Amino acid sequence: MKTLHLPLAADTTRSVVPWVLLAGLSAGTLELAFSSFYWIFHGVSPSRILQVIAGWILGRETALAGGWASVLVGAALHYALMTAMAAGYALAARRLPVLLQQPLRYGALYGACMYGLMFVVLVPLLTGSRPLATLQPLDWQVACFAAYVVLVGIPCAVFARAARHD
């Protein structure tokens, strides 16, 4: 008599977690490197970028005056958000396996959605400001959107696929 062996949820979770963490680290580093490269030509240092991110929860003035402590808060927030995005894709892929079959297509779409979620919904809610589209130059908006598509969404999808095949 044949028995059906289904993996326990803990088995699946244990194998996915390292991939999700790696995806968050990769997407976060790629996006931060891209942002740093873009803004360095506008006189904005990478540490200032992280302070601005910290300002989403600390308040802009507090974060900008906070020195290295606010840089670390911004880095932690940035990587936590990227890891949450990676986890979101991995969870969605458990219910929709097609997301793993075409990671470039669906990863790009996911990145576009995450851009919208971050800069049209989340950041304005956290800061009480208008959406990014009314605050930033158009060339930055386009570049940032492209970065989320390529440097955030696609890595989330590729790592979720790697986790499934681990």
Image (spheres, rainbow, N blue to C red):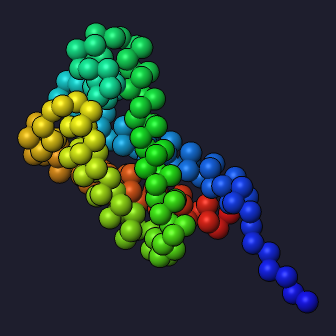
Where in the figure is residue 97, as x and y percent of width and height?
A: 51, 74
Q: Nearer the viewer, residue 43 or 20?
A: 20
Where in the figure is residue 24, as x and y percent of width and height?
A: 49, 45
Count the numbered circles shown: 0
In the displayed structure image, the side of residue 78 where residue 19 appears, left or right: right
Please say whether residue 51 is visible from this viewpoint: no
Where in the figure is residue 3, as x and y percent of width and height?
A: 85, 82
Please say whether residue 112 is visible from this viewpoint: yes
Which quadrant would the C terminus be assigned to in this image? bottom right
In the displayed structure image, the side of residue 122 where residue 130 appears, left or right: left
Where in the figure is residue 98, as x and y percent of width and height?
A: 47, 76
Q: Residue at x 80, y 80 (%)?
A: 4
Which quadrant would the N terminus be assigned to in this image? bottom right
Task: Answer with the quarter of the image where residue 63 lies.
Answer: top left
The relative height of residue 64 versus residue 3 in the rendered view (above or below) is: above
Q: Nearer the viewer, residue 59 or 43?
A: 59
